[in-house]
Image: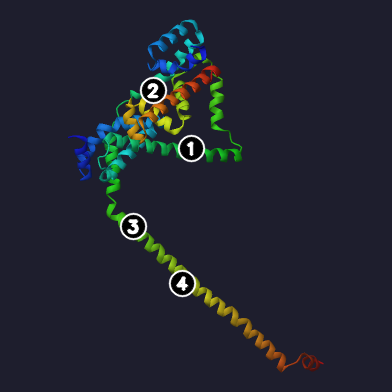
């Protein structure tokens, strides 16, 4: 086996997944190649991290915490059903009120703004009819 | 009480049965989550969520697979969801940093690593290096590798958890190891830790 193919099979050598022949070839190469030997050490230490993480400590109060979470979910159960219904109803009511109020305000404002200029126009026209500008100027002389 | 009786108890709201199930599987779930997310606090929080989901969805469990397979499946899915969420978060943070002119966290880590001589590799750095290499694996390879290495599960059970064939599991784990070795070799050559 060549140097590169030996190096690429080192992780399988570590996991004891090579055939007897392959294993023997790797071991022969390791005796000669310092670079592969160093890399094997590097690889072994790297993979050891997993073994160390598996030896995890106890998990104190794991179920106590979980149980508290379950209580939290279960307790407001009756309320949550009510709030699930109450929130959209309340929101819809506020929205309907706002729309109604807006419509009322809009209609009042439009009737006010339309009537006002109409009245003033009529008044002005009436004024012109009753007193033309010429007679007004003449009367001041 | 066997595991199917436990599930039956949980389906009927029996808290004692749930406690027994949690105590049986808590270490296994935390280890699986830890193998995928590489953070103890996140792994424990995920494990809590996994058991809440078990409690909530126990009534849907039909017993087609082993309880442990079902629990492992929930744990891997939850862990992958957290990783995807964190990835999205990091993506938006990097965009924000690009526009605000902030320094990328990734480059800070590599700068720090570049200053350290090879002899001073600490356990933490070695652990970070391996986690980084595992994180670079495609999702399916990562799950298969984690279940095999962290939980020492047989290929058959991994196939059931991942709902794929036995041959696919073998191939995924083989490719995962090759990719992992490649990344560790690049790091070894560049003396990146």
Which one is in front, B171 or A30?
Answer: B171
Residue ranking furthest to the left: B1
**As drawn, is A113 to the left or to the right of A54?**
right
Helix, strand or loop status at disc 3: helix
Pointer 1 local density, CA inside 10 Å: few below 14, some 14–19, many at least 20: few
Asked whether the residues under marks 1 and 3 belong to the same chain, the reply is no
Whether tag 1 and tag 4 are in contact, CB under 8 A, the answer is no
Which numbered tag is attached to residue A100? 4
- Are circles 3 and 2 on residues that touch, CB within 8 Å? no
Parent chain of label 4: A
Sequence-first tag of 3 and 2: 2
Mark 4 touches mark 3? (CB < 8 Å) = no
Compared with A43, B84 (above or below) is: below
Write down the residue under mark 1. B87
Name the spot of residue A25 as percent of width and height, x first. 44, 9
Circle 4: element type = helix
Which residue shows up at 44% across the image and 65% down it? A95
Question: x%, y% of residue A14?
Answer: 40, 16
Give the class, few, some or many, for how many residues have Cα within 10 Å of label 4's Cα (few <14, many ≥20): few
Disc 1 from disc 4: Cα separation = 46 Å
**Residue at mark 2:** A50
Chain of the residue under label 2: A
Which residue is under mark 3? A83
Q: Is residue A110 above or below residue B11?
A: below
């Amino acid at each position: 086996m060549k140097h590169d193919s030996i190096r690429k099979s080192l992780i399988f050598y570590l996991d004891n997944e090579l055939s007897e022949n392959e294993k023997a070839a790797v071991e022969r190469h390791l005796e000669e190649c310092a670079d592969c030997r160093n890399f094997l050490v590097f690889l072994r230490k790297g993979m050891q991290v997993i073994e160390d993480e598996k030896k995890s400590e106890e998990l104190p109060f794991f179920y106590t915490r979980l149980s508290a979470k379950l209580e939290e979910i279960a307790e407001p159960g009756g309320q949550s059903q009510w709030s699930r219904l109450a929130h959209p109803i309340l929101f819809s009511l506020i929205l309907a009120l706002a729309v109604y109020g807006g419509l009322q305000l809009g209609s009042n404002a439009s009737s006010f703004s339309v009537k006002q200029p109409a009245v003033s126009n009529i008044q002005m026209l009436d004024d012109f009819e009753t007193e033309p500008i010429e007679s007004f100027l003449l009367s001041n002389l | 009480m066997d595991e199917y009786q436990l599930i039956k108890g949980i389906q009927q709201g029996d808290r004692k049965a749930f406690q027994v199930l949690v105590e049986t599987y808590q270490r296994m779930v935390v280890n699986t989550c830890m193998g995928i997310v590489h953070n103890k606090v996140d792994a424990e929080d995920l494990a809590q969520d996994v058991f809440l989901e078990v409690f909530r969805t126990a009534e849907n469990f039909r017993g087609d697979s082993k309880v442990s397979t079902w629990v492992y499946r929930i744990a891997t899915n939850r862990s992958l969801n957290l990783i995807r969420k964190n990835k999205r978060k990091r993506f938006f943070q990097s965009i924000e940093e690009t526009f605000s002119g902030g320094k990328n966290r990734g480059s800070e880590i590599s700068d720090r690593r570049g200053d350290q001589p090879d002899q001073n590799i600490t356990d933490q750095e070695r652990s970070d290096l391996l986690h980084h290499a595992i994180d670079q694996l495609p999702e399916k390879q990562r799950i298969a590798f984690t279940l095999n290495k962290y939980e020492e599960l047989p290929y058959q059970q991994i196939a059931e958890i991942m709902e794929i064939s036995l041959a696919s599991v073998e191939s995924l784990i083989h490719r995962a190891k090759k990719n992992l070795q490649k990344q560790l070799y690049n790091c070894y050559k560049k003396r990146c830790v």
